[in-house]
Each structure stands twice: as structure tokens, then as C-alpha cells.
Amino acid sequence: MSRIARRFAALKAQGRGALIPYLQACDPDYDTSLALLRAMPGAGADLIEIGVPFSDPSADGPTIQLAARRGLKAGASMVRVLEMVARFREDDADTPIILMGYLNPIEAYGHARFCADAARAGVDGLIIVDMPPEEADLLDGPAVEAGLDIIRLVAPTTDDARLPMVCGSASGFIYYVSITGVTGTRTASSDELAAALPRLRAATDLPVAIGFGIRSPEQAAAAVRAADAAVVASALIATLEDSLDEEGRATPDTLPRVLAQLSDLAKAVRSAR
Amino acid sequence: MSAADSSGTERGVAETLPNSLRAGPDPRGRFGIFGGRFVAETLMPLVLELDAAYAAAKADPAFRKELDYYLKDYVGRPSPLWFARRLTEELGGARIYMKREELNHTGSHKLNNVMGQILLARRMGRSRIVAETGAGQHGVATATVCALFGLKCTIYMGATDVERQKPNVFRMRLLGAEVVAVTSGAGTLKDAMNEAMRDWVTNVRDTYFLVGTVAGPHPYPQMVRDFQSVIGDETRVQMQEAEGRLPDVIVAAIGGGSNAMGIFHPFLDDPSVRLVGVEAAGRGLDSGETAASILRGRPGVLHGNRTYLLQDEDGQIDEAHSISAGLDYPGIGPEHSWLADIGRVEYVGATDDQALAAFQLCTRTEGIIPALEAAHALAHVAVIAPTLSPETLLVVNISGRGDKDIFTVAAHLGVTL
């Protein structure tokens, strides 16, 4: 059983949903983001998404765009991201790590080599925003071979004709993009979520995580009442950004502030049901 | 082995397609390994819907008839094929003809494609149009048809380009479009494209994304090429009338590659016709400040398609550089990438300085002020025409007029306007 499946099974046994925080690798620098990554499980992260910085994040809103820019300026590269995961794995063997990003840095690394190196570093799953199932052929084989889950995105526009195909090729969990839009903007209403989830449940037995637009503890709690996990990204990054000094460097406030916010989210998620 | 023979199987175009270089893309939108539909799941159903809508329109004679009407009476087609006598004499070599796309309404080839897509958007019931623009030519063309049909229009333009293309920005605003200056990245065409895609993914229900070049997710590269192929189709007929045979060489500038694809495509299966695409070399192909995606890039995935991209070792996309805002893009249409790999089209570079010199040469000898984009094609003509025999028939695509560029050119020549 993969780390992702184990974690969701354990949470199901406890009768609660998962909190999946997101951080952008090397934002604002390698050491700070590694320290944040290492502290996240203690603050209540059940799984963690690491954003791989890309020069052209065309599905991301302003907050993650700026985070990616800071990460690249601090020297982020795929090699550094995998190194960061390997360092994290030195003292955490259980928390699933999912890399989220765009396809081109993986193409540049080489599909098969990337999957092998990512699995060796301790990565469990991949979310690739600009790789719909129709274009996944070059990556799916090496990912399966390396034991990596390919987490598919489902959107409000994914129609019934398409949904079985998308879910059929998914593993790990389904990432439901709860709004039509970029990251960190609008929030889906509970009515919208209530309408979307039965359709998804009918198409897959995999756990469902809800992402895009979840900012507050209340919204995170609503998400895990409707589904199995809540992804929080831009709200945490906005806090990190706000804690930086004028030159964009980390301050003594950076980690405590982000982790305090994460704890509040975790409390809400754990008491949601 | 001819290019046609090798293309069928080795490059992965479906074997069921006819033995022609004009048959692509395959049903997945691939030209060999290039092209495809690399978009977020939110957009995937829309891209598939567009593919079906375009296929239906293409098969509908009423759509063709409607497009022909607007192309003739609104765009002003056909555009002339002009024998450039003084430029021919000055360069001393090939007989140079100019395909006068700068005479279209709005001053460039862009309206050919925009007219086709706006009619499609109307058929699809979309009420709002978004588009990206570099030099502003595509933005002006899009704003124009939105005015013509009374549609809401938002144009994304890099902040750097807004600054260097002020006349076009003003034109778009006069036409009723909202022009959004994009400040992310270097503020050029790549950033405008990112922002237009963000708008599209946010406003999927009512918005049509009107892509201006032969790039993006399938079916855009094919659709834009089809709409621009009117350039090459006319050139074929006009050259027959003028000289009784096909041209020997066709030269066109390439940013995303729509004017070049439009004039090349009808000649792909004529091996006697040499096709030359001129990329913007910027300050030099090896200066690190270039926009020559095929000559200095590697295959990768950006903006919905796999194609040649200027990128670093880690797959981060480089900033392109060109004096011409319309060529200032680190990628190129996927069909060009395929045509480069199979060797059917030659790709060369022209620097900023060469383009500036050709801009002046064309203006002085023919009384035609070309766009800086087209000046790159002219720059290569100035290199090769003297080496060719006087019997050689050469066509250069004058993709746009240069009025918009006079401020840029004046600044480079040290003149204050």
C-alpha cells in the first residue's frame, strides 16, 4: 500500500478528513522552506504538497506566481526540490509528499529519470497542472514503474462523458478543482460543493481532495465535511509573503506565523465532523 | 528519401493520413512529436468543444461563404502580389515579389485569422472575447472585429509592449477594448499569453480565447493555419498569372509563425518551392538575447503545446528578445517545429540591426514601410537575393505595415520625434 493510501485509510479509521497544506519550494529560500516542510506535520499537516517553481505558472493566481518567482530567484531547480524531499524523509517516513507543478521542468529532467529520482527521494505522488490524461502517456508508464501516484485533476467543467476516463486513469486521490479559475481567488460555495461531490463519488472510489479557494478554517472544515481532504495553498503563502522583510527575506516571524495558521486550519479540520 | 516519405511513419504522424505534408495534425493535434493539448483539466472540455465546433464550421459551406464575404468586403482581400522592381535592382539577383498583407484592413495579416475565429465564436454563442497581443497587431485586429460585431473584448498585453507600442494601445481603446497591461515576467508576449489563459480558465462559460498565432493547444495551430492559408493560396494563383509558374523561394518572418505558416502551407507538397522562415535573432543568435526558438531552443511544453522553446537546463522558460514586439516570444507554432525537424522548411535568423537596415531599404526603394516583423524577412532577402539567378522567383511576405514601429525605429536611429 502506498504512503498516500495508508494515510487516507488511517484517517478514515479515525473518522476525520485530511489537511493538505502547500508550500512553494525554496520560497523565500531553501533553508526556510525546508524548515517549514519539516515543521508542517507537527502543526497538523496530514499530507503535504510541494510546489515546483516554474517560470510560467499559467494556472496560478498572483500569490503563487510571486512565490514561484521568489523560489526561482533563490535557486530552485528540480534537483534542489528532490534534495529537499530527501532531507525531509531523513526524519519523516510517513507523511505523504506530493509534487505539484507544470510539465516542462519534468520534460527537461527526462520523464523516466525524473520518476525514478523522485521516488528515490521519497516523493509519493505528482499533480501536473498542464498534463490532462490525454497527454499523460509519456509520464504514466515511468510513474507506475517508480511507484508514484498520478493524481488527476477534476474541474467543474469536467462533464459526465469525460469524468470516468479522468478518474479511471487516476491513482492516490482525486484533486477536485472546486472553481473555474486560477489558484487563490474565488471560493466555492457549500452548495456548489454539495452538487459536485455525488457526481465524483459515483465515478471513483479514490479519496477526493478539494482545492483552489480554501482560505479559512471554516472553509477547510466545510471541505472535509463534503470530501476527504482540504488543500490550502495561497492563504498560507500570503501569510509567508507578509512575514518577509523589504528585500523579500525570511524573518524570525516567518515560520511561527505560517505554522500558527496551519494549526488553526488543522484544528478546524479535525473537529469538522 | 524525400521529406514526404520520411514524415509518414518516422515522425509519428498517423499512417492513415494521406501521403502529404499538408495532412497534419493527427486526431490528437500532433505534428510528429509536436503540438497536443497540454492544458489544465478546466480547459480541456472547452478545447474539445472548440475542436468539434471548428470541424463542423469547416464542413459547412455557409460558414465558408460568410467568411469569404467578410474577407473580400471588410478585410479587403485578395491582397496584391507586387513585383518589387527597385528592390530587385538594388539587390541584384532574384526577382522579388512582395505579398502585400500590410494592405489588409488593420494593417497586417492578423485579420485573416481573427475574422475566421470571430465568426466561429459567434456560432458557438460566446459573448466575450479575450486575446493576447505582442506588437498589438493581433490585439487591434481582435478589437476591430469585436467592434464590428458588438462583442466585449479584453486584450492582454505585456507592460513593456504597451510602452513600445503606444499607438496600437490607443487604437484598441478607441475600438472599445479593455487593454490590460501585464506586469509579470518581462512584460512581453509570453506573459500576456499566461494572463489571457488565466482569464479564460476563470471565465469559461461565456468567453472565447482568440489566439493570434499558430500555437496553443489543438485545434488552434491547425485552425489559425487554415485561416491564414489564404495568403499562400492567393500567392499560388497570382504567381501563375504573373510568371506562369510557381515561385522558387518564399521567405517569411516567424514569431509564433502565423504569417509564415499561412504562406508556406499551400506549398508544402511542392518540393521545388524552397521555404525559408526567418526567426528574430535579436542581438545575435549566441548573444543570449534572442527570440530564435528553433535555432536556439529545445523541445518542451508551454502554453498548451509541445514545441521548440527557449529554456534553461531546468526547463524554465527564457525571456526572448527582439526589437520587434511581435517576434518577442520564446516559442513557436508546433507545425514549424515539425517542419524544421523533417527539413522541409529552412529556419534562419536575422538580427535587430539587420531588420532595421532592411526596414529602411524597403521604405527607400519601394515606398512601403514594412512592420519590423516583416523587416526580418526582408533582411534575409537582402542576404540571399544577390546570390540567386535573375530567373529565380522569390516571394517575401510583407506581413504588416510599419507605421506602428516608427517610434521604435526613430529611437534606434537616434532621432527624437
Image: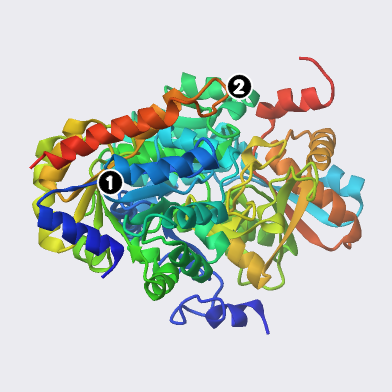
Label 1: chain?
B
Residue at the outermost bottom position: B1
- The residue sitting at 43% across, 37% down in the picture is B196
* A124 or B291: nearer the viewer: A124
Q: Position of residue B309 (x, y in %)?
A: 61, 54
Q: Is the residue marked by circle 1 packed among few (<14), some (14-19), or many (20+) residues within 10 Å?
A: some
Name the quadrant containing residue A185.
top left
Name the amino acid, label 1.
Met
Give whichever of A245, A181 is nearer the camera.
Answer: A245
Q: Which residue is mark 2?
A: B166
Name the secondary structure under disc 1.
loop
Residue B53 place in picture, x, y as percent: 30, 55
Residue B182 pos. (x, y %): 51, 29
Q: Which residue is mark 1?
A: B124
Asked which colour scheme the image uses, the reply is rainbow
Discs 2 and 1 lie in a common subunit:
yes
What type is the residue that disc 2 sits on? Lys
Cα–Cα span, label 2 and label 1: 33 Å
Q: Residue at x 43, y 68 (%)?
A: A139
Question: Farthest top residue?
Answer: B417
Alpha-carbon neighbours of circle 2 within 10 Å: few (<14), some, or many (≥20)?
some
